[in-house]
Image (cartoon, helix red, strand yellow):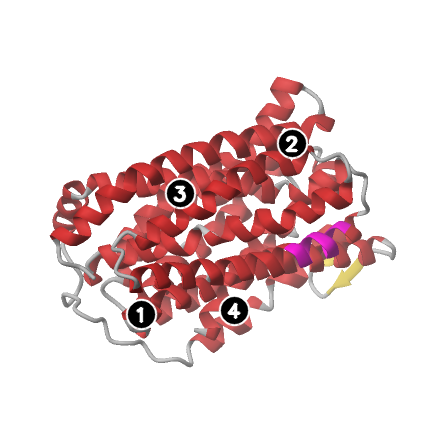
Amino acid sequence: MILLTFAYTFALIDRWIIGLMVGPIRADLNLSDTQFSLLQGIAFALFYCTMGIPIARLADRSNRRNIVAAGIALWSLMTALCGLARSFGSLFLARVGVGVGEAALAPAAFSLITDLFPRNKVGRAIGTYQTGLFVGYGLSVILGGWLVGTLEQGPPLEFPLLGELSAWRATLVIVGLPGLVIALLCLTFREPARHGAVEGGVPIPQLIEFLKKNIAIYGNLVSAFCMLSLLFNAVLVWGAEYFIRIHEIPRATVGLRLGLVVGTFGCIGSIVGGLHADYLHRQGDRGGTIRSAILATIVLVPTAAATPLIADANYSLAMYAPLLFFGSWVFPPAVITLQLFTPPSMRAQTSAIYLFIVALVSMGFGSTSVALITDFVFANDLKLHYSMAIVGGISGLLGLFFLWRLLPIYRKAMAARNLP
């Protein structure tokens, strides 16, 4: 559990660290906000999504531990290669490689965790695992801000075989390579037994038939968390640049402050979300996981819309605390719902399909939707905060709508299958 959480932490560091280096990368490679958003979104998300499904099918039939270790090694090397990119095209391809590597982690990890823990502890286990998301983001902006700020004050670093690298390039090489250690450590734990699984996984037609039969469950669940993840990406991916561009706070200062807020309140919210979902389930509510997500979303929506519009930088940063708390709360209930309703032999594949759609929408369009509004609606870089508020508010309301539709359908389906 510790190793999987560390792996997720490193995944998020490597995924998000370029968000703190928008200015230097744009200047060095002559990029627009929209091009940069493609590096944060489509370049990563497209192959993260498409590769997730075949890798997950492999995870449902073979050793999940080895798949996780191989994925970590790949994305770590590709993050380092991002620092060597000399054009938009080469950086885009390196980000694609990061996405392919990270596609191996989540479906296999969710399946492993569900087999490692009894039913009454799955919520807290998944909530703990997902703290890696917020620790990873926090460390990405803290370490990224500190590294770039420190390296920018001195001459370019000289690396063996690589030559001189500027601050942002050196930062990506430095943060990418340590992931190889985590990959090796993952080879030290044993593969747990699959509880109730069919040997070798299930045939694809059987998987498709199950998903079609339960399309109301999966359709509303995926739609809700597409919207909530889009909200999350809109306010988080652009968070550091928002404080740098709109409030004119130095990059290193933003990294430290925002990283501490995200790391602290994101972790607390993720754990509370898992515990609260477990608590409601113990009270006999078969829809407890969905109800938990609804309660958090009701608070999240107005908070996401208001936070970027606050004129005072300190108050805006303070609002990131409840924004991250409730924003992180909603995700463990989604994963718990998916894992509990899905038969063991389909969990990794179903998780991959869920992640395919959610990640493609949220990562592919979350940051890009903000950039498109900034570039083509306002046509003004200094209107970034309005774009964040628009995307956050609208996507949050849509997410709440789909959760509300899902609750009675999910309760009825759980009762019909006599699932606890």
Q: CA distance from mark 2 to mark 4?
A: 31 Å
Residue 103: percent from the left, percent from the top?
A: 41, 54
SS for dot 1: helix
Q: Residues within 10 Å of mark 2 (few under 14, many from 20)?
A: some
Q: CA distance from mark 3 to mark 2?
A: 25 Å
Residue 316: percent from the left, percent from the top?
A: 71, 42
Image-based side of 108 in relation to 174, left or right: left
Q: Are marks 3 and 2 in contact (CB under 8 Å)?
A: no
- What residue range appears in magenta? 254-261
Residue at 57%, 50% in the rendered image = 324
Front disc: 1 or 2? 1
Q: Is residue 326 above or below residue 43?
A: below
Residue 260: say if magenta: yes
Front disc: 1 or 4? 1
User: Which residue is identified by label 2?
Assistant: 33
Residue 32 appears in the figure: no
The residue lying toward the viewer, choosing from 306 and 283, is: 283
Residue 3: percent from the left, percent from the top?
A: 47, 73
